[in-house]
Image: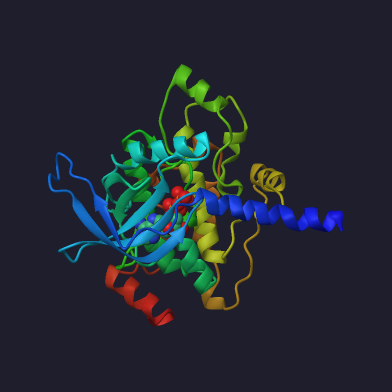
Amino acid sequence: IKNLVQHTAKPVNKMAQKEKDHPPPPPAEVIEPPSSDRIKGATYKTGKCLGKGGFAICYEGQLAGTRHKFALKIVKSHMPQKKMEQKFQTELQIHSKMHHANIVKFHRAFSYENCTYIVLELCLNGSLMDMVKKRKYITEPEVRFWTVQMAGAIKYMHSKGIIHRDLKMGNIFLDKDMNVKVGDFGLAALLMSGKDMNACRRTTLCGTPNYIAPEILEKGKGGHDHMVDIWSLGIIIFAMLTGKPPFQSTTADEIYRRAREREYNWPKLETSENSISEETKDLVSTLLQDPEKRPDPDAIVQHPFFTCGWMPQLEEMTSALREHHPT
Ligand code: ADP
């Protein structure tokens, strides 16, 4: 009985802890206090819950007196753990400086009733993760379309000296027109050199095992830090096409071992028209090379994968996805 109690008590406590970390649902109206660029302040009418993250909760918010809708990302002003506080500060600082069509737009941030609100561009179609869960896998033409957009976002971030470091399907959102938007800059970092970089390497491991490039785990391979995002892109492409990441295993250590040894297999998909092309396989293996050999975003979009088959127009993306998911 003692064992049983212990076994059942643990997860319950963990859940309770998680609930404690999350902020409570917001009031029906959230007040943004006056600031220098909005002297009268503003009011947001809160709508449906969009999702819960590690410590944030997202609600739809409509700016009162307008038809503009946003995603309100809410976190407690005083976070229980220092690490979370840091993640959040990084997110605010880096995300607010990003301006690109394929990066979730950061509008503003303010405090109200013990919570911090980040006003973000609303991505009505969820994340790539949600899309893959619903559809099982994404077709090559759709992957072509989204990969070009993701490469554009990565090129922009790297040109600004930012490494995202946590690119994964759950952090890539889809707007109402099915454009991808990179979000969640909580683990992003400014590219550093020399001394700073060594200090940075000493920091604890970050990211999600399935998407982590092997060199993050090996110290002393300098100069190609930004290439971790290109590795993650390779994992995302594989995962979109097959429904799961290539090195998926039951333990993180096993994922890392398989990643180091590039041990992955392309599964046979149900229908032959959905089978994976040689160009796709080549693109993924190119992205999963050692960091110094990985192509940069400009070279990526020159790969034959982008010209060997149909590249949809934006209108076609929207209608194709509607066919799969009538709303
Ligand atoms: P955390 O930083 O705590 O991981 P997230 O940024 O992942 O939080 O946000 C939590 C959830 O809120 C996401 O999984 C997603 O469902 C939803 N979400 C986040 N940003 C947006 C957005 N811009 N538009 C729509 N939904 C969003």
Q: Quadrant of residue 90?
A: top left
Q: Is residue 11 left or right of residue 152?
A: right
Which image quarter holds the C terminus? Answer: bottom left
Q: Is residue 208 left or right of residue 53?
A: right
Residue toward you, 285 or 150:
150
Residue toward you, 324 or 284:
324
Residue toward you, 29 or 119:
29
Q: Is residue 248 left or right of residue 140?
A: right
Tell me the residue at 59%/57% (across/down): 245
Q: Height in image: 325 above or below 98?
A: below
Which image quarter holds the N terminus? Answer: bottom right
Tell me the residue at 34%/42% (across/down): 95
Q: Position of residue 200 (x, y in %)?
A: 50, 26
Tell me the residue at 62%/31% (across/down): 218
Q: Height in image: 246 above or below 314?
A: above
Q: Answer whether residue 308 is visible to the viewer in this image.
A: no
Residue toward you, 186 or 237:
186
The image quadrant where one finds ligand 1 is bottom left
Q: Position of residue 4 (x, y in %)?
A: 82, 58
